[in-house]
Image (tube, grey):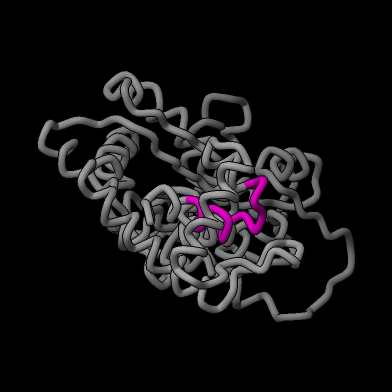
Amino acid sequence: MTLTQYQYIVAVDIYKSFAKAAVHCFVTQPTLSMQIQKLEEDLGVTLFDRSKKPVATTDIGRQIVDQAKVLLNEAGRISEIIQLNKGEIKGQFRLAFIPTIAPSIIPRFLKDFTELYPDLELHITELQTEIILDQLKKGLIDAAVVATPLEAEGVIEKPLYNEPFMGFVPEKHRLFKEKFLTVKELDIHDLLLLKEGHCFRNSVINLCSNTFKKNEKSAGIHLESGNFETLIKLAKQGFGMTLIPCLLALELKETEDKRYIRPFENPQPSREISIIYRRAQLKIHVIDKIAAAIQKSIPKHMLSNKELAVVSPL
């Protein structure tokens, strides 16, 4: 029994396919299959039901795969101890961002970070929160930057900053002449929303709970989109107003659209942004460096929650 064999069975359990697991492990499928079969023979049990599509892990296989993950995690700590002792930041690191954070934050910190740590191979992807939590659990990503609190089992949340909500109010809207917005003035039927699956949408709905009733319908056009750029364009065409994150609003201030930005009165509604990772994560030193780099790139007033009210993303 070897650590390599354990890596192979964990990969098959994750991908539910010998072919996909082989690609992930950078070996041929016959090599992977042969090593798993040898492990099954040594253990005297069947780990996978190969007659099913996708491949299914047997009951005893599930117990062994779970223990294999523990062994692999503990084995990986040796490399981490050596890197920490040498002060090294290198190797691979898989980092995810939710789509409503990625466009504003990645350009702020990435260039300086990669210059500081050129030996770190950083893999960045955009995923929705539900997928991020699933991939963290499966070990497919190392950490993610998301809106919190999530309170997911086995997941550590390290707050980075608090990002206020800002109103984007077009000229003919009833609130255009207001210098500051209040939550009481918002009407969910008057707001352009991101489509389902985005936690920013959930936060806006929670913010407008006083005007939103489940299953309530109103006359007119119901518009939803997967990105803020579309919502902003639709707002300017007179389809309503929308709410956007502060960092996006700061970028708009460099354009003619800045005249449509309206802050909220204190306490400003905001979202808490955190870097999250599994409790058994081995690369804490890398996570700390990423967290520090992100915080360094953020306006100082967003690093505290003073005069801010965090809105749940759930």
Farthest right residue? 220
307 displayed left or right of 106: left
Q: Which residues are magenta?
A: 8-20
Indicate the quadrant where residue 51 lies: bottom right
Rendered residue at 32%/55% (across/down):
73
- Tell which of 269 and 83 is nearer to you: 83
Closest to the observer, 35 or 184? 35
Does 116 sit above or below residue 69?
A: above
Q: Decide whether the magenta segment is chiefly helix, strand or loop.
A: helix
In the rendered image, the vertical position of residue 239 relative to residue 106, given as above or below = below
Instruction: Name the residue at 69% across, 63% down.
Output: 50
Residue drawn at (35%, 23%) of the image: 114
**Magenta stretch: includes residue 111:** no
Q: Position of residue 133 (x, y in %)?
A: 50, 61
Q: Is residue 99 visible?
A: no
> Where does the image place residue 105, in percent across and percent down from the top left?
45, 36
Of the pair 107 and 117, the residue shown nearer to us: 117
- From the image, which quarter does the C terminus lie in? bottom right
Residue 120 visible? The answer is yes
Give the quarter of the image for residue 148.
bottom left
Q: Quadrant of residue 115?
A: top left
Please state which of residues 89 and 201 is positioned toward the viewer in this rendering: 89
Q: Residue at x 47, y 62 (%)?
A: 137
| Residue 171 as seen in the image, left or right of residue 203 | right
Q: Quadrant of the N terminus?
A: bottom left
Question: x%, y% of residue 10?
Answer: 49, 57
Find residue 27 and report its horizontal and vertical position in percent: 55, 37
